[in-house]
Amino acid sequence: MNSTYPYIASLTGEPFLFYEMRTTAKLLTSGLDEEEAVAQITADNLFQYPTEKSLTRMAKACIKRLHAMEDVDLINAIATQPTEIAKQICLYAMMKQSRLVWEFMLTVIGEKYRLKDSSFGRIDLNIYFMRLQEQDDTVASWSEGTITKLKQVIARVLVETEYLDDIHAEHLNPVYLYPVLENAIRSHGDLAILPAFNCFCKEVQ
């Protein structure tokens, strides 16, 4: 993740979206192009949303996030692999798209695994955002409501991907990096992010 990428708050309206990501991935791997996938999602209301406008916007958001991985095999894996594996790959897609999530997973979660510190609480999210507000003018300009919503989204992502048992959990679970994603991370040269998945073996396997 390039440190020159801006921090964006779009996660407030585009959270983890596992069902939507999986649905979109299945359409793309079935042979549809992007426009055809968006059209089918909208025509058949595949996300079961109340308005066509929200369907189209979220379908395009899913496609953008899938493409952030720059890996057709991972898109196929989201479509076909068991839920826990697909969810982990969706987290990677989210990280690749969002500098906010990438840096949180690396500097907070990855660092806790590195230090063998399983404690986790709202204070960890608070400190992370306080530091960002001090360091970055864009984040400093976000409203308190936006910051609160982003904290909620990230906490729910950690629950969805089984880092936390629930949003009130006070400790991190040990996670397992599935080989399909580990191999992709290595091939993309993203070794720096391995600690976020509790993986510290640097050698190529």
Image (cartoon, helix red, strand yellow):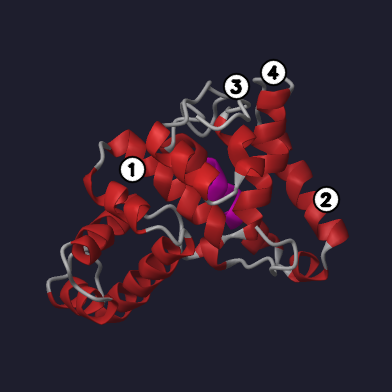
**Three-letter residue code for mark 2:** Arg
Q: What residue is shown at x 42% (from left), y 39% (from top)?
A: 160
Query: Element at badge 4?
Result: loop
**Three-letter residue code for mark 1:** Ala
Q: Which mark is residue 171?
A: 3
Q: Main secondary structure of the magenta part?
A: helix
Of residues 147 and 20, which is closer to you in this image?
A: 20
Magenta residues (range) = 149-155
Please say whether residue 119 is visible from this viewpoint.
Answer: yes
Query: Element at badge 3?
Result: loop
How far apart are labels 4 and 3 at the CA level?
Answer: 11 Å
Q: Which residue is mark 4?
A: 116
Query: Element at badge 1?
Result: helix
How far apart are labels 2 and 4 at the CA level?
Answer: 22 Å
How far apart are labels 1 and 3 at the CA level?
Answer: 23 Å
Q: Which residue is mark 1?
A: 86
- Mark 3 neighbour density, 10 Å: few (under 14) some (14–19) many (20 or more): some
